[in-house]
Image: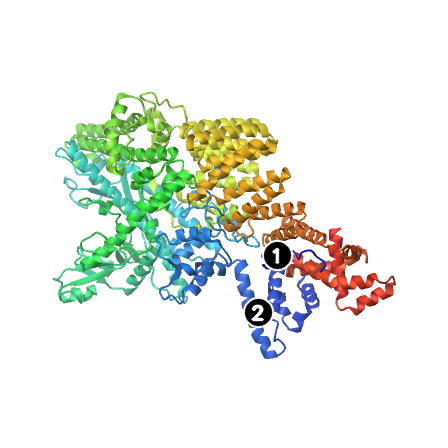
Amino acid sequence: MYFASTGRPPNGEEPRKMIPVKDTETKRNPAKLENKLKQKYTFVVEHEDYQMLFSCKNSKERDLWLSALQDGAAGTEAEHERVSLRNKRFSIVEERMSVIESPVGTEEFVREAFKSYVQGSGDGVLRISDLHDLFRHLGHSYSARQLEEIIKDLDPRRTKNISEDAFVEWWLENSDSTIGDSEAGGLEDWDEANIAPQEARSTTMINEAYSPPGLLKLNKKVLEDKLQPFDDSDMDWNHQYQTLLEAKDENSETSVRKGLLLTSFVGSFLQTAVEACKTIVVEFGLPEALKTVKPLSLSDTSSAQNTEQVYLHKGLLFRIAQQAYGADGTPDEHQDRRAAAATDYMHRKIAGHEVRAVNWLQGACSQARDAAEGGKEPGKTDPTLHTVLTCLVDYMGFRVYVTCIPPVDGERTLVFGLTEGGRKMVEKMPEARNQLDAVGQIMNLQPCAHLLPQDLGAEDLATAAAEKRPDEEDGDRRATLPIGIDVQVHRGDDKRLYVLNVSNIFPPDLPAPNTNQMITNKMRPELVEHSATPLTSDAYRPHNSTSDMDRHADDTKCMQTSLFLLREQTHRLASKLDSLTVFVYDSHTLTTVMHRFGFNIRHLGSVYAACTSPHVRTLILTEAIGRVCKHLLAQTLRRAARKHHVAMAALAQSVEPSQFEAPQAGAGQAAAIVESIVAENAKHQERVSALTTEFLNVVVGSSTESDAFWSQVLPPAIHEKFGPCFEYASFKACVHLPQLLLALQYHCGVRLRDTDEFNLKSPTPLSTDDVESVALPSWTPNTKMECYRLAHLADVYVGKGYYEQAFQAFDIQRRLDENAYGDLAIGHTQRGLLLHKIAQCYMRQGDLPAAIEHAKAAFHSVPTYSAFGARIHIMIMRLYFSQRQVDDAMATFGMAHRAILWSVGEHHPLYGNLFAVVADMYYEHNSLGDAIDALNKACHTIDKILGSSHLLSTALSAKLGTLISVLGDSNQALQLYERVLGAYDKAIKHGVNAELELAAVEASLAAMHAKGKDLRHALEYAQKCMQRREAKLPFDHDDLLASYRQLAVMYEHNEDYAHAVVYLEKVYLAQKRKKDGQEAVSDIQHLLVNIWKLKLKLVVEPQAYALLQQCAEMWDPEEIMTLNMPTVVQGTSRQPPADYFDELVEGALPVLTAMHTTEDHEEKQRIIDETPGSMETLGQLSCVMILCS
């Protein structure tokens, strides 16, 4: 033996063989490449497989093919065996390529893999025990801790079964996200990805693809052309909408074009709806003859029991809900006002349920349509379900439901569903039931049963297709409906199937007895879709089944889901919010997080009670007060509008209807009355503006009336809406008033002057000039469409560093949002978020001027003095500082400081984050003293807000320890690190996922001890760090590779070259799996040479070492490198570099020893010639020794 150690890992495991990825031949001449392949791979030519080799796209695929050939090389002499071997090779190559090439992560590939593991189950679900094998099949291996976190997302109800749709959805959302689920991350990295459905800080990470995805083949005109707005003067809105939806997604360009046309159409729809709704509300008090948009005469409008008005304008249908009037036409009595408010609330909730249900159903229909088209032959697909384009518009206290008009006509077009108050079941098209069944499975809704009356005739029973229950008498019949008893399917005059009456498809959310909460309180679609069992939309109804047992089972499922939300999910969300794993800072982020976790906003009180962080509780309390104030303001404005309506009606009684349009000659009094009505209506609009301003002043100002509002009006209103959890709601001191003012601006349909100079200690901090009423339309895009899927890939591309692809996806998303929302208030927040993301992408790419430009552009949509505005200011400050524009950076720091103090106050993590970012800026420019001062300020602020034991405080302390150690104060740094280690250990014992943060501290401690020549403690901490990262991170993660490098350096300094080789080789093998690039290639070459140098140091016999040194001097270096370097590259691609070096040395040393015994050159040549393969071995070894010299 010539070596002290073979360089194998201590546990004896074989190092993992990796596949070369560098592509150096894709652009060569095909003919030359084929000739070269024939010469280089002669054994392939002998087996007549060089054509397959030549068809490979690059060297990566060729090496896979060669490896496949070697795996199946035995028994290839006979011709009949050659055919079977070739088939085997194809399967080997396909299996290996499936792990690393583009199919990974696509829905089709994942579904096929899933089905291969559930074939034996019989019920189409995956057992938890098979999850690890499925992940390995998909090319990933996760630790036990990672699998536990993944199972929590996939199987929240602990049924030990995972459905195909749930797994595929989880995979597509999480497979490309970054690792960690870190609960102590820096605030400077927080963005909208923190509020993904299963939290974007996922516990998993897919291995990066070898090469970035190609750019979409889009004609520039597709995104650059300005689409002309649709003409709404004489449009069949429904026909145009359905035609756009039915366009085929043939490729990326057609998908994007379809999305742009559709969103442009929706934009015209929303603009028309908003303009008409504003007109309807402004003209609410006018007599019908003076109205621009006239109501339809659907019923007796003079009746006090009339509860709604319907309008038809420009082909759209508008419906507003009205409360019942009192004896004099206005609800002046207290009980009348309460009844009117309750009626209004119920109508508003039903309208909201209708729009949300349509959006949810539309996405499910899209998925069902795609699945049907994928499984059918072209031209043989069944009729698909269609939904109607709808939206809500809130303006000046009124909510208006707007919809297109489908070509349906009651029972004439009804083909599936109940009619006549549930007395009759119509089922004329079996395809309708099939489609609803498919949609119900996607939505995770269980079919529900409805008892038909016993007095139906034979013809009605046949039409109803009713089923007789064995345990029922002959007269009892039931009808089964897939997603709800109220849902109907109509076959319109255009031959399309329309789904209508869908407001009740959401399952009820545990209604209180003797209330209408079964109608108003519905579950979120996110909760229903992730329920362990399908839920029925007709739970808690007495007619939803044919037996008490079935009804009880359905009710129990819904009740268990509601309790799961209120118990387990509430504490889970509260934990995320308190630990800052999920960061919320304003109404938009809090609402988004609540919805994505499956919570309705009415559960704010439960989340508030479960949270402990003061800034989170303050935000939730502020949100609750803001939403209650929204309803109180809306009631105030509606009450004023209806009083105005009664006054105008009394004034118009003396005028004949015909005189409104054309007053007759001599009818001067009538004309004067008409002018008076119009003038009074204009004055009413001014009074509405004054009422709005007065209400806001009462809420945020300082006056006796304000104190009475906070002590007498607000507490019972909050208790009625959110329950008894907000016990401190009557104390104005518990709320940051500017934050409440921003919440009111977000919810109440008002736009305030963008300033931080409102004097909230004044009785009237706001004037009418500061307040502008705006309409708030509500519409949600169908994100299941292909164009939105392409747009939402931007975040994935940014995380992987594919910036060109990210900018293209961002551009698609920008055009979709601009087309849909235009200048509407609903689009401002989305546009600001998108510009912020684009600025972040430019910053990561290094284009700082473009990042500044896009960040500043976000302020056209985002209030300057808001929490989100503060985040944008912080980004701009950092960008200015990176460009050495110190004056601009300091000015922006002042703006960020003002924005934080105004929007959230100094007792908020954002305030500490501001100084943490300043510390990072100083550190990046080697100003360590200033960095430590700023970081001390950040640590003091966070300690005061969250406590010294919070993980964010711990992370900042660890960063401070690093800075202090750089300055050379090792003792103080060690004290900080010891405190940080204790905090992380305590957190981990309590179940907090802080392993990676603790590993980072251990890496810093290892570096400190190594710098102090204390290699024993350095190796101890480095090993702990490496073990933690191995348990949590993929094998090629940068942090894990940094641990391997650190250990390799320490072992080399300790002259333990065998272990140094082991860890360097791990880095080398992992780097070869990463993306191509000049930097990566240089690093791989450097690692290769270092491994060989360490292997040389393991040679213990001086004579052997001398012989190896002589090998490099035997031939001309340039000539030997030219001849043998390609073979060396090929050799290192087939096996780890340490094994390759051992093989060369063991083959060359006997020849070198024999050659050393003679000085005759001819004798040396004879020894080489007589030893088979020695020339090739010596040539390769010479190349290695030259590289190491």
Report which residue position mark 2 lands on.
89
Instruction: Give the residue displayed 63% in from the left and 51% down from the top.
Output: 1059
Task: Give how far across and how far down residue 420 sits, in percent.
Answer: 17, 56
Is residue 345 something that shows in the picture? yes
Task: Give how far across and how far down residue 1152 sits, in percent.
Answer: 79, 61
Image quadrant where residue 643 sits: top left
Instruction: Give the residue displayed 67% in from the left and 56% down from the top.
Output: 5
Report which residue position mark 1 lands on.
21
Is residue 502 something that shows in the picture? no
Q: Is residue 755 left or right of residue 361?
A: right
Image quadrant where residue 776 sits: top left
Q: Earlier in the sequence, mark 1 or mark 2?
A: 1
Task: Give how far across and how far down residue 456 sits, in percent.
Answer: 13, 63
Q: Amino acid at mark 1?
A: Val
Q: Secondary structure at mark 2?
A: helix
259 and 738: which one is in front?
738
Q: Amino acid at mark 2?
A: Arg
CA neighbours of label 1 inside 10 A, class few (<14), some (14 to 19), many (20+)? many
533 and 673: which one is in front?
533
Q: Secondary structure at mark 1?
A: loop
CA neighbours of label 2 inside 10 A, class few (<14), some (14 to 19), many (20+)? many
Task: Give how far across and how far down residue 287 sits, in percent.
Answer: 20, 35
